[in-house]
Amino acid sequence: MARSWVAKVSRELLHKELGTYRQPRHGEFGNLNCLSSMLLRRFGSEVSASEQMNLIRQLREKTSAPIKDVKAALVSCNWDIEAAHKDLRKRGVVLASKKSSRTAAEGLLAVAQNDNRAVAVELNCETDFVARNDIFQYLASSLARVALSVESPVQQIQAAFPFGPEYLENMKINADHPKLCGEITVQNAVTEVAAMVGENVKLRRGFAMSRSSHGVISSYLHTSPQLGLGRIAGLVTLEVEDENAPLDALQRVGSSLAMHIVASKPLFLSKEFVSSEAIESERDVFKSQAESSGKSQMAIEKMVEGRMRKYFEEVVLLEQKFVMNDSVHVKSLLNDLSKEVGSSVKIGNFLRIEVGEGIQS
């Protein structure tokens, strides 16, 4: 008799919940015990402490949201985990929008490449703690893969191709992560991750580079938490005249040169790319410094020329001493490589980027 009364009350409450006096479909809410449990949660009755902790743990694992926000969402949704998840996502978009004006100068660079092309993408956050977060790193890697898949003018030209966030915002990511899954636009993915980690997360910029002839593209990432991620990136293309030349030696030297670029911070490929204004400006500074020494004009000219050589060694890649063997310059390294492969090898292009450079903290 008692069981019949519980079933009757449960059925009436269910009719109200469904908004119509239809019978639930077979298996729609499982057995009577499951139905009663659902109704208890729906209508605000007490949920046991152990079950509360279990629901908090599940939602925390699913969203990475702070425990305080997870519990608040569950309480406001009468401990319905799916409704609480939806509520957290809505709340997260609002919070992410509020945080978008905060400075985000930390983060990671993600590099993706194939035989002909390489891209580097910068994803920023506010703290290095978030940069170590698994979902943040997953997003950065996904953005680089999406950028690599996009056709761009750099495939027809030799120069590096810079692009801003608008270049990728509406592209789709097929996410496959416990906290971010399914097809989602880049813009929405960045917003969702910002909501999860509780910081301003921003896709700042990217660069793409391709080789224009037979050769290799090499990359190096410094302070790398995992493959394809780091705080400083160096990219370089090596190109060889003979299209039948083997590429093993180029790949070996290319990897070393990418590391050299990160360490030595060159600004120009060769002297020809240094503007005449920059050269004259440096020469004037060096001349003024030399004249203050009180030495003869001939000595002053020698001092100026010596300092100009030093200047070129600092900013011009081909003039720099090779960081892995400072007894040779980079141009000498290329000459030796050309002899090894039996054909002229040159650097097509290079790029060095660092997380947060140019951002005022």
Image: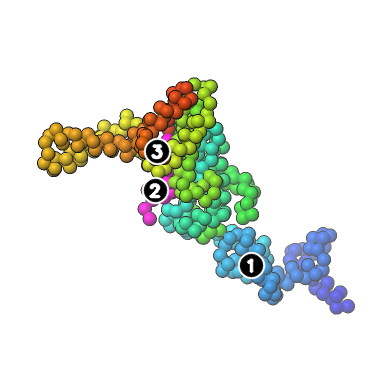
Point out the tag, 1 or 2, that comes first from the N-terminus. 1
Disc sitting over residue 56 in the figure: 1
- Look at 58% across and 67% down and name the residue there: 67
**Residue 266 pos. (x, y %):** 36, 39
**Residue 154 pos. (x, y %):** 48, 32
Q: Residues within 10 Å of mark 1 (few under 14, many from 20)?
A: many
Q: Which residues are magenta?
A: 350-361
**Residue 267 pos. (x, y %):** 35, 38
Q: Is residue 114 above or below residue 246?
A: below
Per the image, is 351 magenta? yes
- Look at 46% across and 22% down and name the residue there: 343
Which residue is identified by label 2?
A: 357
Real-space CA distance between mark 1 and mark 3, rounded to the nearest whole angstrom: 56 Å
Helix, strand or loop at label 2? It is loop
Task: Please count the marks in the image.
Answer: 3
Relative to 11, 177 lies left or right: left
**In front: label 1 or label 3:** 3
| Identity of the residue furthest to the bottom in this view | 2
Mark 1 belongs to which amino acid? Answer: Ile
Disc sitting over residue 325 in the figure: 3
**In front: label 1 or label 2:** 2
Between 135 and 231, the residue placed more toward the observer is 231
Between 126 and 117, the residue placed more toward the observer is 117
Relative to 18, 133 lies left or right: left
The N terminus, quarter of image: bottom right
Point out the tag, 1 or 3, that comes first from the N-terminus. 1
Q: Residues within 10 Å of mark 2 (few under 14, many from 20)?
A: few
Quarter of the image holding residue 46?
Answer: bottom right
- Look at 56% across and 65% down and name the residue there: 66
